[in-house]
């Protein structure tokens, strides 16, 4: 890549504006082809981009975190010092593989998962290599989760959500890959052995693709939009979700790039609240398994559906119909019924009957979309934990009885109740 071409590209007013607009309140690090510039650093003025390019700058990388003053960052800072300086952070899924076809499938499913959680204002960006970045801005986050300020939950919050989404789409991603190529072709293409790719009789898609969770650490950087990738000399460009599967890398050649979209430039307040609640509940779900084990049971989805007589008060109260919180209640019902052994046809019939009791029933199309998504996911996800006030308390269904004492999740209740009845005490 000739220096003159790099300078010409970064001289584009729209390119400069797009880079600087994202740089505000972030640490920005300049890369000079094969080495990285000083840290900490920032980028404030558009003309600085031209000067840096003339001095050999090839790309710009920004922090996921936003800072009061990024120039005050030091390598030896303790967590509290970082927390005091941090004003927020963005959620960015870094999806990568050696094979662009696989990352396309994964990126599409991550977008589907975000939309399932009610998030519409997210951004998608081609990395310039063989991956995609999918971002949700801090402005869409809830201010608190489990009584903790969200701005302090970095990098732990990002890791939890990335792990949750990875787990959520795992089975579907494996199916999508196998519909694209069979195991024989995958082995030939990747050079991997059968026992590397197949675990417990199923394809492990994360042997082929990574959704970056390990590298999410404080001061973690991502390639900024409209900057080069030095390995390919393609440009990292924002795209629409609908363009992911048909994306052609020729569109990322610098001569073909049109600056028409931003990255992390759109949001809706609290839009990501549901995602945070469900991801953090998922992270706590292992505690539920321990709780059931303490009752002398092993937590697996029962082969025989547990009947309603054993259901906890919160579920019984949801069944009576609600005036508010119907979408949250639907999410609780579907996951609870799955976790206590109900099949999908029974769940479908049950939630539609429940919906008739609501003061204002949910649209059938909404219920069907939720059921269809859950049906695509193999296994079971527990309903939100009992301490999650955003659900049971807020919608007015938390009316505990004697069995509820010390229970962390409604799913534990029927196990505990059945055990007591079984032993007559």
Image (cartoon, grey):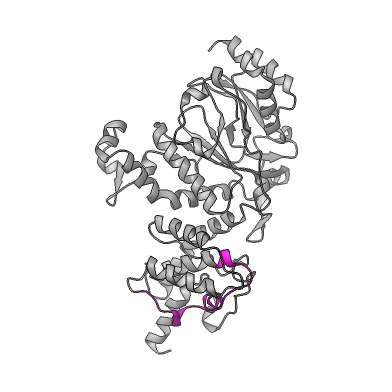
Q: Using residue 178 as the reference point, say whether residue 273 is left or right of it.
A: right
Q: Using residue 10 as the reference point, say whether residue 362 is left or right of it.
A: left
* Residue 57 or residue 252, whichever sits in front: 252
Asked if the stretch drawn in magenta spans residue 42, the answer is: no
**Residue name at image x 51 percent, y 27 percent:** 128
**Residue name at image x 56 percent, y 20 percent:** 35
Q: Position of residue 278 (x, y in %)?
A: 54, 58
Q: Which range is magenta? A: 305-329
**Residue name at image x 58 percent, y 50 percent:** 119
Q: Position of residue 353 (x, y in %)?
A: 48, 74
Q: Is residue 294 above or below residue 264?
A: below
Q: How many marks?
A: 0
**Residue name at image x 48 percent, y 38 percent:** 95
Q: Residue 58: which quarter of the image?
A: top right
Asked if the stretch drawn in magenta spans residue 315, the answer is: yes
Q: Is residue 390 above or below residue 149?
A: below
Q: Residue 295: which quarter of the image?
A: bottom left
Q: Using residue 211 as the reference point, say whether residue 187 is left or right of it.
A: left
Q: Is residue 265 above or below residue 291?
A: above
Q: Position of residue 9 (x, y in %)?
A: 62, 17
Q: Position of residue 44 (x, y in %)?
A: 74, 27
Q: Residue 135: which quarter of the image?
A: top right
């Amino acid at each position: 890549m000739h220096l003159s071409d790099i300078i010409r590209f970064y001289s584009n007013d729209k390119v400069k504006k797009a880079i600087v607009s994202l740089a505000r309140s972030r640490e920005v690090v300049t890369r000079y082809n094969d080495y990285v510039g000083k840290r900490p650093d920032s980028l404030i003025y558009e003309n600085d981009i031209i000067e840096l390019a003339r001095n050999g700058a090839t790309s710009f990388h920004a922090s996921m975190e936003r800072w009061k003053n990024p120039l005050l960052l030091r390598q030896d800072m303790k967590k509290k010092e970082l927390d005091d300086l941090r004003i927020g952070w963005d959620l960015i899924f870094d999806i990568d593989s050696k094979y662009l076809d696989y990352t396309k499938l994964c990126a599409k499913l991550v977008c589907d998962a975000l939309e399932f959680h009610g998030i519409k204002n997210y951004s998608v960006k081609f990395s310039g290599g063989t991956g995609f970045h999918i971002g949700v801005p801090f402005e869409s986050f809830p201010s608190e989760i489990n009584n903790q300020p969200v701005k302090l939950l970095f990098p732990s919050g990002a890791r939890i959500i990335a792990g949750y989404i990875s787990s959520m789409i795992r089975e579907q991603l494996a199916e999508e890959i196998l519909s694209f190529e069979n195991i024989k072709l995958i082995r030939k293409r990747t050079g991997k052995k059968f026992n590397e790719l197949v675990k417990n009789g199923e394809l492990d898609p994360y042997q082929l693709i990574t959704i970056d969770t390990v590298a999410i650490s404080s001061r973690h950087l991502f390639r900024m939009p409209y900057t080069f990738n030095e390995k390919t000399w393609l440009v990292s460009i924002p795209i629409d979700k609908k363009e992911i599967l048909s994306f052609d890398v020729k569109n990322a050649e610098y001569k073909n790039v049109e600056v028409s979209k931003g990255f992390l430039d759109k949001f809706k307040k609290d839009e990501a609240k549901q995602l945070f609640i469900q991801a953090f509940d998922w992270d706590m779900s292992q505690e539920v398994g321990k709780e059931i084990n303490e009752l002398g049971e092993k937590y697996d989805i029962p082969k025989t559906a547990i009947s309603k007589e054993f259901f906890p008060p919160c579920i019984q109260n949801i069944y009576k119909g609600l005036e508010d919180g119907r979408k949250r209640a639907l999410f609780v019902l579907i996951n609870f019924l799955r976790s206590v052994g109900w099949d999908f046809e029974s769940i479908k019939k049950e939630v539609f009957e429940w919906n008739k009791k609501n003061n204002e029933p949910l649209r059938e199309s909404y219920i069907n979309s939720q059921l269809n998504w859950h049906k695509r996911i193999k296994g079971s996800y527990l309903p939100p934990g009992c301490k999650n006030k955003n659900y049971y308390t807020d919608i007015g269904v938390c009316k505990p009885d004697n069995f509820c004492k010390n229970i962390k999740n409604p799913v534990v209740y029927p196990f505990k109740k059945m055990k007591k009845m079984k032993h007559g005490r």
